[in-house]
Amino acid sequence: MELTQILTIAGKEFRDRIRNRWVLAVALVFTVFSLVIAYFGGAQQGSVGFRSIEFTIASLVSLVIYLIPLIALLLGFDAIVGERERGSLDLLLSLPITRFELLLGKYLGLAAALTLSTLAGFGLVAVLLSRQMSWDGLFHYFGFMLSSVLLGLAFLSLAVLLSVLARDRTRASGLAIATWFFFVLVFDLLLLGALVGTGGRFGGEVFAWLLLLNPADVFRILNVFSLEDVRTLYGLASIVPPSMGSPTAMGAVMLAWIVVPLGLANWRFKP
Amino acid sequence: MASTFLASDGAAVSLRGVGKHFGALQAVDGVDLEIPRGEIFGLIGHNGAGKSTLFKMMLGLVSLTQGEIWIGGAQVGGRDFRAARRHLGYLPENVVLYDNLSGLETLRFFARLKHASLAQCQPALDRVGLAHAGTRPVREYSKGMRQRLGFAQALLGAPQVLFLDEPTNGLDPQAIRDFYATLRGLQAEGVTVIITSHILAELQERVDRLAIMSAGKIQAVGSVQALRERTQMPLVFELQLAAEDAPAVAQALNLVTGAMPEALPNGLCLRCPRAQKMAVLAALAPFGSRVLDVKMLEPSLEDVFFGFSD
C-alpha cells in the first residue's frame, strides 16, 4: 500500500469540496441551525435564549440525526459510481494504484471535508456560546461534536459502499435516500412496533442491543448517556441498559460502523 | 521493475491463449498475439466483438479466465505489474475528465498518481496543442480539447506502451492529422501503440499491423496489405475510354482469366483476381493512348474487415 497514492486521491477530493464551497455551505448550515436551536429551542415553553448546555445538546442531537446522515450520504453516494459513469475509473485503475488505495483515498478526502465542515459549523457555535458555557459544558459539547463527526463518517462509509454496489448514479442516489429513510425514520419505528406488538414478552434489553444495528441510534445513545439531564429527556433511555452507556464501547461500535461498510466496499469493488 | 521494463528484445505485448467469459458469454476466446516494440497496432471489430474486454485485460482491469498476458516483461496481474503500469499510457473511450480542474491541474493529478515528474505536464499540453488552455477549467473545453487533454494524460511518464481506445473521437481533421503525426514521433522513440477505431479509413494507412476481432476471437492479423492479399478480394480497375473503343477493350479484357468487365458511362469497370493485375495491364497496352485514364482500386480496410468478420 502506497500512502502517497492515497493522499493524492484524498487531496483531490478534499480540494474539490473546498473549491466548490461545499465545506463552507455545510458548515454554515450547521452553524445557523445550531444557533437557531440554541436560542429558540425553548420558544414552545415560552422562553427564548440560551438555556443550558444539556438542553442545547438534546436539541442538537435531534437535528444532527436528521441532517448529518443525509449530508454524508449525499456527499459519498457517487464517489465510485460517478467515476465509473465518467469512464475515469478505468483510467485511474490503469495507473499504479490499487482499488483499495483508490477507495481509501476517496473516503479519506470526503471524510476530511465532512469533518472540517462539522467541526467548523459546530465549533463556531461553541465559540459564540463559550461565555455562557462552563468548562464542563464545553467538554460535553466537544464530545457531542466528536460523536457527530463519527456519525457522519459512519454514513459516509455506507455511502461509499452504496457507490460501489450501484450500477449508475441514479440508482446510487435512490439507494442513498432509501438508506437515510430506513436508518433515520423507519428503523426505530420498526423496533418500537415490534416491542409493542410482542407486548414486551421478548425482553426489552434485546431491543436495546438491536439499537446498535443503527449508527444513528448509537449516536443517540452516546449523547443521551453523556449527560444526566439529557438522559431524562429521552424515552429511549429507559430501555437502554447501563452497560451500553460506556462512551468507549459506543465509540468502538461507531468505529465498526465506519470500518465494516468500507471493508465490504473494498470486497465488492470491481472496475 | 521500472528499470527492467522492455529491457529485453522480446515482444512489448504478448498474449497467450487469453480467454474471458462472463457466465455463459465467451467475450474473449483463445487469443494469441505478439506485438513487437515500436509498432503501431490496430485492433478493430464490431461492437461487442471483444476488443474492449481484451483492451481491459491487457491493462489488468479485467481478470483473465484463461491464458496469460505479458507487457514489457511483466505479467499482467503479477507482482511486477504495478510497477510496470508506470510505463503504460491509456486513453479510454469517451472519458470525461474532471470539470472543476484546469487542464494543467488534471495533468498534475495524473502525473502524481503515475509517479511522473510534474515538469512533464506543461510540455505534454504543448505537445497536444493545449498550451494556451492549460489554466482554463476543463468544463470550458470543447469535446476535441478534452480528447486532446486525455491524450496528454496518456503521454505522462514517457510511456513505453500506449493503449488508445477510439482516440480521435471529437477531433477535427487537422487535429487527427496532428495526432497521428505525434504517434509517428512516439513510434520513432520506440513506443508501442495499440489503437482501436471505428473509422477504418483512418487506420488504413496509419497502422503497421492490425487484428480483426469477431465473436471474441482474432480472425486475422497482419498488415493491411497482407490482409488484402489473404482475403483474395478482386482488384478493381476503372478505365476511361472513348465510347467507340469500349467494346474492343472489353473484348480484350475478357481474355484475361477471371476478369469481369462492366460498362460505365465513360468507359469500363473491371474486377479481376490480384494475380491477374499484370495480365490486365498487358491486355491494355496495345490500346495505347486510346485508354484515356486507368485507376486501380485496392480493397479498402472496410472491405477487408467485412471479408473477415462476416
Image: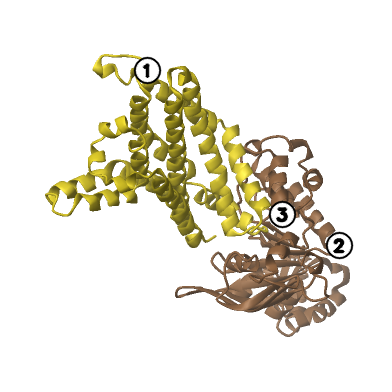
Chain colours: A yellow, B brown
Query: What residue occupies the far left of the structure in this picture?
Result: A199
Check disc 1 and give the amino acid type. Answer: Phe
Q: Chain of mark 1?
A: A
Dots 2 and 1: beta carbons under 8 Å?
no
In depth, the one of A39 and A168 nearer the eye is A39
Check disc 3 and give the amino acid type. Answer: Lys
State the CA–CA distance, disc 2 to disc 1: 75 Å
Check disc 2 and give the amino acid type. Answer: Ala
- Tell me the number on the disc at residue B188: 2
Q: Quadrant of residue B46?
A: bottom right
What residue is disc 1 on? A50
Q: Quadrant of residue B41?
A: bottom right
Q: Residues within 10 Å of mark 3 (few under 14, many from 20)?
A: many
User: In the image, which is nearer the foreground, mark 2 or mark 3?
Assistant: 3
What residue is disc 3 on? B114
Relative vertical location of residue B245 with respect to residue A174 in this rendering, above or below: below
Image x and y of residue A267, in percent: 49, 62
Q: Residues within 10 Å of mark 2 (few under 14, many from 20)?
A: few
State the CA–CA distance, disc 3 to disc 1: 54 Å
Residue A167 visible? The answer is no
State the CA–CA distance, disc 2 to disc 3: 23 Å
* SS of the residue under disc 3: loop
In depth, the one of B93 and B221 nearer the eye is B93
Image x and y of residue A144, in percent: 42, 34
Relative vertical location of residue A185 with respect to residue A94 in this rendering, above or below: above
Residue A80 visible? The answer is yes
Q: Residues within 10 Å of mark 1 (few under 14, many from 20)?
A: some
Asked if badge 2 and badge 1 are on a common chain, one would say no
* SS of the residue under disc 2: helix
Image x and y of residue A177, in percent: 37, 43
Residue at 49%, 46% (x, y): give it.
A78
